[in-house]
Amino acid sequence: MAAHPLIEDRELGYRRLIELGIALSAERNHSRLLEKILLGAKELTNADGGTLYLRSEDERELRFVIMRNDTMGIALGGTTGAEIPFAPVQLCEPDGSPNHSNVVAAAAITGRTINIADAYNVPGFDFSGPRAFDQCTRYHSQSFLTVPLKNHDAEVVGVLQLINAQSPDGRTIPFAEELVPVIEALASQAAVALDNQMLIDAQRLLFRSVLKVFASAIDAKSPYTGGHCHRVPELTNMLARAADAAREGPLADFHLNEEEWYELEVAGGLHDCGKVTTREFVVDKATKLETIYNRIHEIRTRFEVVKRDAEIDYLRAVMAGGDAPALRAACDARLAELDDDFAFVAECNIGGEFMAPEKMARVQRIAAITWVRTLDDRLGLSWEESARQPPTSESLPTVETLLADKPGHIIAHDAGPIRADNPWGFILKPPEHKTNLGEIYNLSIRRGTLTDEERYHINDHIVQTIIMLEALPYPKNLRRVPEWAGGHHEKMDGTGYPRGLKREQMSVPARIMMIADIFEALTARDRPYKARKKLSECIDIMARMSRERHIDPDLFELFLATGVYREYADIFLLPEQIDEIDVARYIGSCRPAEPAAA
């Protein structure tokens, strides 16, 4: 009988072992790594079959992860995607004692290789399982080589079991003792590679969990921004997949490898991490008078007081002998006027696209209405709120205006962590660092519900995001996270923030995240400060942004043409938000017009 070729040519065996070791150390895919370990061992020993087991996290059992058998045509686990239907091997007996009767468990417990020439004639081990398998399949499980996989700490992380060594003429023979050191060397290299892979996977799992915890922390501050932090990465991934799949057009050369997909996942998860520094009453400000609560209720109470005063003045005048019908008519007219004034103030509080100058003038007129306060407004205040109140020697009762901008409405803040030398190149210029809660000031906001100071603090979240991200010591495969995550408020024409970047200065992933961020914000159904928009409204807005060189037209057309917008809508939008989109009318028409010739 001819000897195994690796026994005849040791140099060939060592060369193949080195090649396998190099391949194992270079493999980054977990399933392919497991397959290379098992298939390499089968090749070196010319085994008909083999199984690879990994130790569970609780270290109480060994899980089947790869199973191969050439004669039976079995290929389970690994890249096949086929599950292995066998229960894990228990490392302990029911009474808690070590399970030495099972050869795989014994190898894991003792850390020693077990070479069995004939499983049907060996004392000390229970081979009832393989025998039952043989009876059902007419296979004959004879020779077994069971090798523990030990990492650099000499801990057993798994077990490699090879079955039925084959002679050159195809007969089942025992595993040659001369091959055992070679397989043990392979197992040692495999264990280290596998351990490294598990450590990397554990680090990635930890990092992904940190991202989820971070999003949940933002969610706890504001459910609206928290939902945003979950949805934008999803949409970013959808559009990036579509760009990666493009085989023609301007995005045909865009492709991401496995490491870059992970980098994009991290960037998406952290794209708004700076929002942890933004005060939630600013993020969630749904009306102009809102702080921790909507102050329209205070103003309503003041109007009620003024109306009561009007009633009291009327009754006093009647009691003094005045013309009751005339006085009643005047009182009713005054009450109606106050009702109308309050309705106007309440409407102003909602905010909108534009507040005309005549409306702002009316706010000033209403503000001048007076009422009488009889209680000290310095009682029951916190020390911080008291410190904002100017010294006063007022006597009660006192006359106050219906609306006011008081010194106590001004809250000063620190400038934050931006250094004077601004090494990040931010173009955002902070206003005076204060919050102005003045009632007239806030009701006179021209657009929306935010003051200039509050809008700066909202925009500042991206500044804080970049500062936070660039402070992290990234490994090489994550060094683009700050750039990818920090550009979603830039514009293709350079008028965005915080750096004023132009299209050619931004990577494709950063431009993808910009579209994802905008589309999520437009379609969001959970914002307290805006009504839900139809899908068609959102697409129209983004088409205009594309024509005005705010977003990338190539990516926007891909977003429409591949149906990514609809895929996202079906998952995250309400059914009543989704209407039909004529994609054809946008393709080509949403590109910027060429600049006129000089």
Image (spheres, rainbow, N blue to C red):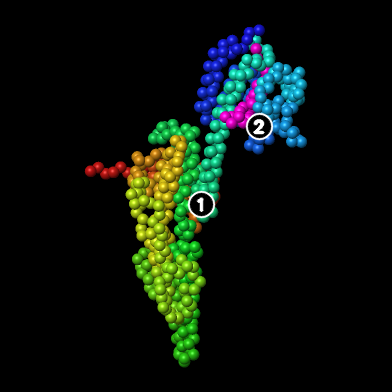
Position of 138 with respect to 562 (left or right) is right
Write down the residue under mark 1: 218
Mark number displayed over residue 63: 2
Picture residue at 54% right of the left edge, 13% below the top: 11
Q: Measured along the vertical axis of the image, is residue 340 above or below residue 257?
A: below
Name the chief secondary structure element in magenta.
strand
Specify whether 169 is left or right of 9: right
Residue at position x 41%, y 47% from top? 467
Residue 98 visible: yes
Task: Report the residue at 59% width, 13% height from top.
Answer: 6
- Label 2 or label 1, whichever comes before in sequence order: 2
Residue 302 percent location from the top left of the image: 47, 74
Residue 592 location in percent, x, y?
34, 44
Q: Looking at the image, can residue 67 be seen?
A: no
Up-down relation of residue 421 to residue 38 (above or below) = below
Rendering coords of residue 310 (x, y %): 46, 81
Q: Quadrant of residue 96?
A: top right
Height in image: 52 above or below 387? above
Q: Between marks 2 and 1, how big is the CA–CA gap?
A: 38 Å
What kind of residue is marked 2?
Arg
Q: Is residue 150 magenta?
A: yes
Please provide the residue range marked out in magenta. 146-167
In the picture as drawn, the residue positioned furthest to the left comes out as 598
**Number of residue marks:** 2
Instruction: Find out whether the residues at labels 2 and 1 contact each other: C-beta distance under 8 Å.
Output: no
Residue 233, magenta (yes or no): no
**Is residue 183 toward the left or the right of residue 353 in the image?**
right
Within 10 Å of the Cα at label 1, are there few (<14), some (14-19), or many (20+) other Cα atoms?
many
